[in-house]
Image (cartoon, grey):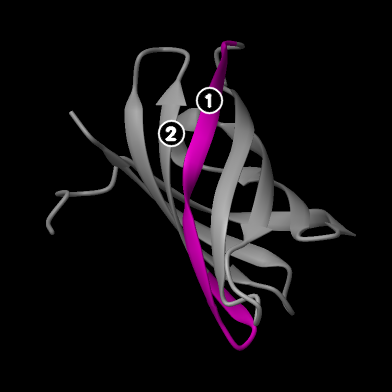
Amino acid sequence: MDFGEPIAEGTLNITSVTVAQGTTTLNYEGDVGKFGRVFVTHDWTSGSDGRESYEVTGSARGLQEDGNVVSATLHGLGRRSNNAVKLFTLDAVSNGDQLLVVADVDILKKTANVTVYSLW
């Protein structure tokens, strides 16, 4: 599937992790292109006994250089392989953007490399 060129890319740092029964919550922050300084919360709900697949929900806020703030709701899926998790979320943004975000999360390094594609 070809989504064309990404509209934004960046690296987020994982700032906190909260573990609960069946759910893991991660908080991230970092710079992501036109979205500016981005703050993201993901809730990962395990879809398998080995915690290899996840349903992902969350929220994001981006503070842009011009002072505008955009917010988004996030829904998607993830799969873990060893210490790496590949996430795919569909994001509905307050400015009308609809996005596909692909994130490569490195649990041990506490980073997520994100690539953002416009769906329209």
Nearer the N terminus, badge 1 or badge 2?
1
Going by the image, does 120 lie left or right of 74? left
Which residue, given by chain and number where applicable, does mark 2 sit on? 91
Residue at 61%, 32% (x, y): give it: 60
Residue 82 % position (x, y): 61, 88
- Magenta highlight range: 68-85
Q: Considering only vertical position in the picture, is 110 above or below 67?
A: below
Q: Position of residue 61 (x, y in %)?
A: 63, 26
Left/right placement of residue 108 relative to residue 60 reads right
Residue type at tag 2: Asp
CB within 8 Å, label 1 to label 2: yes
Q: Residue visible at 47% across and 14% down?
A: 94
Q: Examine the image and state in which quarter residue 97 appears.
A: top left
Q: Residues within 10 Å of mark 1 (few under 14, many from 20)?
A: many
Left-right relation of 46 to 17: left
Residue 24 sits inside the magenta stretch:
no
Q: Residue at x 85, y 60 (%)?
A: 21
Q: Which quarter of the figure is the C terminus placed in? A: top left
Residue drawn at x 77%, y 51% is 25
Residue that lies at the very extreme toward the front in this rendered image:
49
The amino acid on which the numbered mark 1 sits, given as a three-letter code, is: Ala
Between the C-alphas of marks 1 and 2, the distance is: 6 Å
Helix, strand or loop status at disc 2: strand
Local secondary structure at mark 1 = strand
